[in-house]
Image (spheres, rainbow, N blue to C red):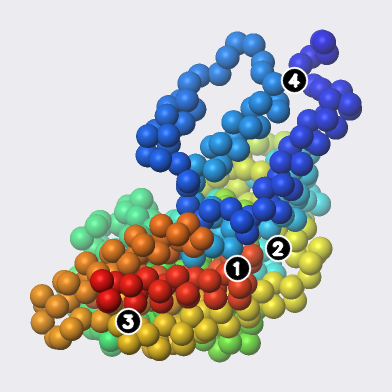
């Protein structure tokens, strides 16, 4: 028995690592065959959940047995890492990023202050600058920080906008977004001290984009009423439909009205690595801040978000603070302290999980994978558009395709019957457990979604998904 059980020797570490690695490799190798949804019955799931609520024992257990229990827990879930996950906005998780994170957690370097681990802080800053300047097209002097996800990135952007445009007087500040904006936008505004009544929902055009003319009218009306418009939030790839707001027109509006222009590109941002994405996502260059989610379209593990800003000084001014216990921490030259750019001081070096895959595989590998997702989404759209029973909107901006049953006529009763048929269709599609789709509400209609984002989703799984969807659609109409 080792005198310090929390410090295993080399042989023990090697054996522990082997047990974990073998399980991870086995699971990853078999992802294509795994069900897309949990195979457990509700009763079995409830019993498993109850078992994991138990407190830890006083005496240690066996690693192999504990890993087997973890496999049970991991199986009781949507298979978000697999090729059949077409619901919500998938986050598939690169194996190389998992290796980076294993290394990162083992060396356990502190990431809040650059002087503690200056080279690793520079690594992280290099990733951020690449995102800000190469991906988003922001100028020299731009930067940002990696976050736990898009919600925290949007919160920090909102705080920066509030500080920059309102100062300490928040009472009359107003924010502008749309019904299709991610819920984190309104949540961030409330957390930043903005009244819920001052969060404006700008009307959208028939093609589901923010209406710039309506936004301009709302901003002018609020100014005339003595309020202080300070933040306009556009979306580059809505969660509901993947639609991109008219970014150049909204950027012009923000400049004319002197409001902070934020783009929520958590889903769509990295499609700018492709030629089609560059065209469809024009306008990033004019943003004050942009939310990105590398755990979506850069295929990183969950918990990897990013905020990039045009002026890093504005982010620093809104979040900077210190304490006497930090007096020994000096600056690290050109690398900013991420702990002074957001609400978190203590966090790990987040950049490694992106740095290693980008340097190992090269940016072209990510670009090609994203091109493939755009191609697959267009194939889904073209195929479903040929199914007479389905109503499919115009071609997608990005990689989300929406569809629903077509009503028999223009009456409300017919629309309600079609919505109920769409609900049952989703249940039947997902019951195959080869794919999992999700739903949303678009202009008061129940709507199904296919979102192609996983780096493991290829033409074979999309062909299978389309067969399931079309077969179940025909089955309903002949029932």
Q: Mark 2 points at which residue?
A: 127
SS at badge 1 = loop
Q: From this view, report whether residue 118 is shown above or below residue 65.
A: below
Label disc, if present, on residue 66 of the rendered structure: none
Residue 124 visible in the displayed image: no
Q: Distance between the residues labelled 2 and 4?
A: 34 Å
Q: How far apart are marks 3 and 2 (CA)?
A: 43 Å
Task: Say which label, 3 or 4, has the lower sequence index.
Answer: 4
Q: Mark 4 points at which residue?
A: 6
Task: Say which label, 4 or 1, has the lower sequence index.
Answer: 4
Residue found 56% across the figure and 89% down from its top:
279
Q: Distance between the residues labelled 3 and 4?
A: 59 Å
Residue found 49% across the figure and 42% down from its top:
76
- Of tags 3 and 4, the one toward the viewer is 3
Residue found 49% across the figure and 27% down from its top:
52
* Pointer 3 with pointer 2, Cβ within 8 A: no
Where is residue 3, by image quadrant? top right
In terms of depth relative to the viewer, which is nearer, 298 or 307?
298
In terms of depth relative to the viewer, which is nearer, 273 or 333?
273
Label disc, if present, on residue 457 of the rendered structure: 1
Q: Mark 3 points at which residue?
A: 390
């Amino acid at each position: 028995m080792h005198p310090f059980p929390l410090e295993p020797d080399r042989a023990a570490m090697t054996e522990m690592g082997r047990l974990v690695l073998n399980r991870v490799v086995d699971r990853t190798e078999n992802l294509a065959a795994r069900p897309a949804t949990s195979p457990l019955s509700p009763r079995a799931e409830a019993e498993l959940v109850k078992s994991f609520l138990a407190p830890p024992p006083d005496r240690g257990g066996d690693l192999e047995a504990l890993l087997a229990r973890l496999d049970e827990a991991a199986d009781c879930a949507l298979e978000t890492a697999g090729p059949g996950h077409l619901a919500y906005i998938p986050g598939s998780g690169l194996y190389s990023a998992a290796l980076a994170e294993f290394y990162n957690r083992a060396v356990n370097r502190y990431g809040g202050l650059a002087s503690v681990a200056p080279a690793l802080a520079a690594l992280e800053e290099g990733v951020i600058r690449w995102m800000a300047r190469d991906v988003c097209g922001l100028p020299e002097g731009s930067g940002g920080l990696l976050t736990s996800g898009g919600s925290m990135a949007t919160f920090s952007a909102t705080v920066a906008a509030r500080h920059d445009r309102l100062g300490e007087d928040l009472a009359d500040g107003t924010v502008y977004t749309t019904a299709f904006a991610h819920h984190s936008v309104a949540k961030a505004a409330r957390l930043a001290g903005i009244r819920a009544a001052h969060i404006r929902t700008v009307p959208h055009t028939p093609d589901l984009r923010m209406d710039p003319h309506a936004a301009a009218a709302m901003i002018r009306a609020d100014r005339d009423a003595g309020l202080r418009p300070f933040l306009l939030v556009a979306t580059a790839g809505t969660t509901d439909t993947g639609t991109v707001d008219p970014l150049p027109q909204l950027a012009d509006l923000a400049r004319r009205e002197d409001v902070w222009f934020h783009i929520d590109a958590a889903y769509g941002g990295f499609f700018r690595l492709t030629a089609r994405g560059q065209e469809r996502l024009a306008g990033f260059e004019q943003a004050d801040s942009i939310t990105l989610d590398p755990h979506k379209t850069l295929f990183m593990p969950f918990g990897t978000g990013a905020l990039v800003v045009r002026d890093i000084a504005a982010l620093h001014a809104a979040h900077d603070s210190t304490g006497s216990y930090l007096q020994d921490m000096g600056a690290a030259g050109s690398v900013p302290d991420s702990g002074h750019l957001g609400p978190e001081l203590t966090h790990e070096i987040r950049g490694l999980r992106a740095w290693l895959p980008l340097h190992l595989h090269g940016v072209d590998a990510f670009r090609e994978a994203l091109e493939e997702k755009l191609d697959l989404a267009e194939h889904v759209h073209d195929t479903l558009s040929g199914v007479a029973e389905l109503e499919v909107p115009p071609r997608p901006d990005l990689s989300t395709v929406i569809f629903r049953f077509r009503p028999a006529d223009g009456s409300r009763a017919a629309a309600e019957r079609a919505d109920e048929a769409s609900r049952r269709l989703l249940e039947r599609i997902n019951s195959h457990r080869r794919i999992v789709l999700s739903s949303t509400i678009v202009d008061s209609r129940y709507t199904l979604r296919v979102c192609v984002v996983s780096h493991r989703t290829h033409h074979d799984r999309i062909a299978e998904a389309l067969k399931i969807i079309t077969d179940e659609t025909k089955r309903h109409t002949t029932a």
